[in-house]
Amino acid sequence: MITVDEARALLLDLVQTGEIEEVPLAQASTRVLASDVAATRDQPPFAASSMDGYAIKAAEVEQHAMFKLIGEAAAGHGFDGTVGAGQAVRIFTGAPIPQGADFVVIQEDVDRKGDLITISDDPGSKDNIRPAGVDFRVGDTISAPRPLRPEDVALMASMNIPRVPVRRKPVIALISTGDELVMPGEVPGPDQIIASNTFGLKALFERHGAHVRVLPIARDTVASLETTFGLAQGADLVVTIGGASVGDHDLVAQTTQQLGMERSFYKVRMRPGKPLMAGRLAGAAMVGLPGNPVSAMVCGYVFILPMLRKMLGQSEEADALVTATLSHDIAQNGPRQHYMRARVEGGKISVFDNQDSSLLSVLSKSNALAVRASDDPARSAGETLHYLPL
Amino acid sequence: MITVDEARALLLDLVQTGEIEEVPLAQASTRVLASDVAATRDQPPFAASSMDGYAIKAAEVEQHAMFKLIGEAAAGHGFDGTVGAGQAVRIFTGAPIPQGADFVVIQEDVDRKGDLITISDDPGSKDNIRPAGVDFRVGDTISAPRPLRPEDVALMASMNIPRVPVRRKPVIALISTGDELVMPGEVPGPDQIIASNTFGLKALFERHGAHVRVLPIARDTVASLETTFGLAQGADLVVTIGGASVGDHDLVAQTTQQLGMERSFYKVRMRPGKPLMAGRLAGAAMVGLPGNPVSAMVCGYVFILPMLRKMLGQSEEADALVTATLSHDIAQNGPRQHYMRARVEGGKISVFDNQDSSLLSVLSKSNALAVRASDDPARSAGETLHYLPL
């Protein structure tokens, strides 16, 4: 059996970073920027007032000095003339500084009588002018790759970038397998349960930028599996759930072999999730996840999200683990790397007692997977533990 | 001027938690659960095998013991008969434990010859059976309110909850105001700039569960503002951007007054964002954000997101600040509460030098807003600072 790191490296080899597509700026949030974008203008495009006040010559700034108003400059409507000696222009925040002026006295420091103003309070030395290009200049870039946040979208708008190059959303086809499964809302037979991983993994992958196609449940026959694999055509990644164990009824391995899959590996030294299988099938990457609900979700976080990030052109930093302080003692780990459901609060991590891989209720209470290396020794409260945030 | 906390309290008074609507499970992820949902079944619905192996009577488990195979139980297809003394049923993971059996010997511990099996290795004392209802029982609940995560969606699927009660998405109408603004992709005149807040705030509010309507840019006339406010009909919250300062050209206050707004407050003792205005207008909450790009985004985080969370029925915990260690000295704060653009990395926070409220480039580099109380004294590297994550 290979290690988790070995499996992840092999899985990353199965996928490629996708093509670039352009989307309107209003749809760019949460997408991953695919190539650097550059400002098409300076911001501000002109020296602008940062306050409401009066634009004058800095050399004339002095308490009790008097000026004659010769016009007005508002945001969107500059003053066309030139400010001469003893002259002032009424100016509002964001308006271009008129020619000849190089200081804005804020209105709170001025007494106005008709067309005459007097500087009534000490105006200080701050000129209240934003120089042209102080925010950014033509050609300044936002560098790729990066998941676009609201702040980036605002900046791109300001740079006048109406269309944004992003990575195409990878298409993941999800196939749940098993005669025991019915869809939510159906009435299960006495030996049946509800397909749950399909919905949990769909939500997980969509949240991280995938387009997810949920295919019909494949039954435990080669024919049903073949039909369903046929429906996966066009996907970048086909993910099966269940049927990847070693029992006589685990047909995914058999069927994919018949369909010509080049197998990359089978089984990983981890808990939960040991019977993981992967390869290339009909031009797509294929990953067979174990059918236990928690195993499937954990493998989604540990293996599929890094694949998704590579397809989206993101750096591997995003996969970095974080640390917290253990709030209680934990026993020695076994020979397999263990992803333990846990809860992190205020920098402290508590690992749940019952780690049975069938317990979705425990997963739903968790916000972290504590990562234990193979044969990790017993750990005491206060020690530092690595975890994967959920 | 009121404080940030006073303003936030008044703003929360302007909005109500919205109605409940039901959505299909596949669309529930990222929505906020509005009322408790209960499992409609036990999981597992029957005692089930957790391994591939052979179901026998626990009393007969002994190394070298021999059993006759009388049938098979697979996931979805139980064994109808009863396991008697000296008998075994081939069983697969997830299959119901047959009547009469109460132990599963894993297949690795068994030698099989035709219809006879022998326990070849010490099978240990673990019965490899998951009791019925070990994950959850009929009536076990997922408690509201909570933003639904992929793990919750998987659990709800397993509970056979095909439709999920969530809060209706609050509708926010966004109105940018100002003669200086053009939309991204347009060619601005010499005195014009690009509307950026509209796009940044749209992305921010959508990410936090709102449905955002971007209205046409309102020009600096009462008539244009009135027309645009007319288009906001049906929104829960109308947010204007710009025109909330005190200059002669700030018409939002004048127009909303003419339209009959009950003003809640005007101006908050904060940086950036002082000229914030709020009230009730035509049955909707109305908030006038300042027009400086950074001020508008900061007020979006500090004021609009808490309003949005209340409308979505979320607890106020979600608004809690977090802490980090200052990586450098910072000067004393002025009289207004200050939200400073900052970067948090590895638990250390660095505050950017230039905090001019026009600099979106600095906001785009930030991942936190360091919060300084009014007249907060100078702080040294190593001290703890509160921040709002971006």
Image (cartoon, coloured by chain):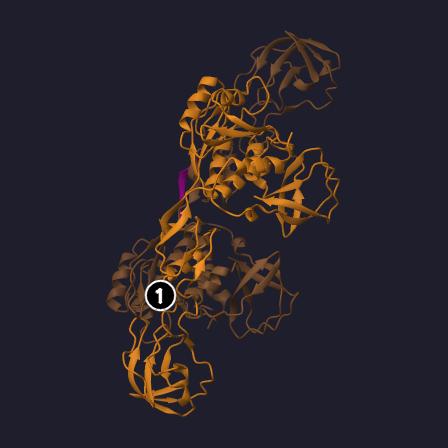
Chain colours: A orange, B brown
Q: Nearer the viewer, residue A48 or B38?
A: A48
Q: Is A126 situated above or below A166?
A: below
| Residue A82 image-quadrant placement | bottom left
**Residue A162: image location, x then y, percent:** 34, 55
The number of numbered badges drawn on the structure is 1
Q: Is B196 situated above or below A277?
A: below
**Residue A368: image location, x then y, percent:** 60, 43
* Residue A114 visible, this orientation: no
Q: Is A183 situated above or below A144?
A: above
Q: Is B93 situated above or below B383?
A: above
**Residue B112: image location, x then y, percent:** 66, 11
**Disc 1: which residue:** B262
| Residue A10 image-quadrant placement | top right
Pointer 1 local density, CA inside 10 Å: few below 14, some 14–19, many at least 20: some
Residue B67 left/right relative to A140: right
State the residue at coordinates (26%, 69%): B221
Q: What kind of secondary structure does the magenta stretch mostly adopt?
A: strand
Residue at mark 1: chain: B
Magenta stretch holds residue A357 = no
**Residue A232: image location, x then y, percent:** 42, 29
Q: Secondary structure at mark 1?
A: strand
Q: Which region of the structure is painted magenta?
A: B19-25
Q: Tag 1: residue type? A: Glu
Residue A335 left/right relative to A140: right
| Residue B343 image-quadrant placement | bottom right
